[in-house]
Image: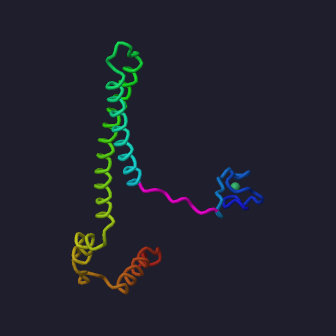
Amino acid sequence: MFCPRCGKADQMPETYCRQCGLFLPDLSKPLKRERPPEEHLKANTVLSVMTICASFTLSFLLFLVLGFRDFTHPLIYVTAGILLAIGAWHIQTLIRTLMLKEQWKRRVSLNEIQAAPHETVTVKSTPTAELLDQADFADAIPASVTEHTTRHLAQHLNPKSRTD
Ligand SMILES: [Zn+2]
């Protein structure tokens, strides 16, 4: 294939151009569909909820089944504590994701207003014709007059006519 920037031939797709360094994508492959941010936010919410449930349940079970016995190894408490911390951490992640979701929704609706039809724009702006006064040609000097005056002036500036 050819580089679209510098035109160097015999190049492999999915590599960088040997001459100018431009990345050459394989255009024969179908383009990957980009996931919209809402989908990532939704996935984050679900994953956070799942992590919170799993870590709290596991830590509860650890304390219930293995904890507070004579033979309880300290590692059980450490693990249960870490699981609790993970759960707490994911609660704040969930809160942040929900806040981000709200923010995203607000931004999208704001963008929709800004990208809205031109009606809103034309209603606000006043047509130029209404702001300006009608042109007044009463004092305008016709071109023939100015031409005549200039010719007259030229005659006056002429040393020959000054002697008259
Ligand atoms: Zn190139």
Q: In the displayed orientation, state which residue is furthest to the bottom.
A: 144
The furthest residue to the right = 10
Q: Residue at x 32, y 58 (%)?
A: 108
Estimate the x, y position of residue 89 in percent, counting from the top left: 34, 33
Q: Is residue 9 magenta?
A: no
Q: Is residue 15 left or right of residue 142?
A: right
Residue 76 on image: x %, y %: 39, 21
Relative vertical location of residue 69 with respect to residue 145 in this rendering, above or below: above
Structure colour scheme:
rainbow
In the displayed structure, 145 sits above or below 117; it is below
Magenta region's main secondary structure? loop
Vertical order, 44 against 142 (above or below): above
Q: Nearer the viewer, residue 129 or 146?
A: 129
Q: Quadrant of the N terminus?
A: bottom right
Magenta segment: 29-36
Q: Is residue 85 left or right of residue 30?
A: left
The location of residue 42, given as percent across then percent down, is 37, 51
| Quarter of the image with the C terminus in it | bottom left
Identity of the residue drawn at 73% across and 51% down: 18
Instruction: Name the quadrant containing residue 7.
Output: bottom right
Going 30% across and 82% down the picture, which residue do you hit?
Answer: 141
The answer to whether 107 is drawn above or below residue 98 in the figure is below
The quadrant where ligand 1 appears is: bottom right
- Residue 102 pos. (x, y %): 28, 51
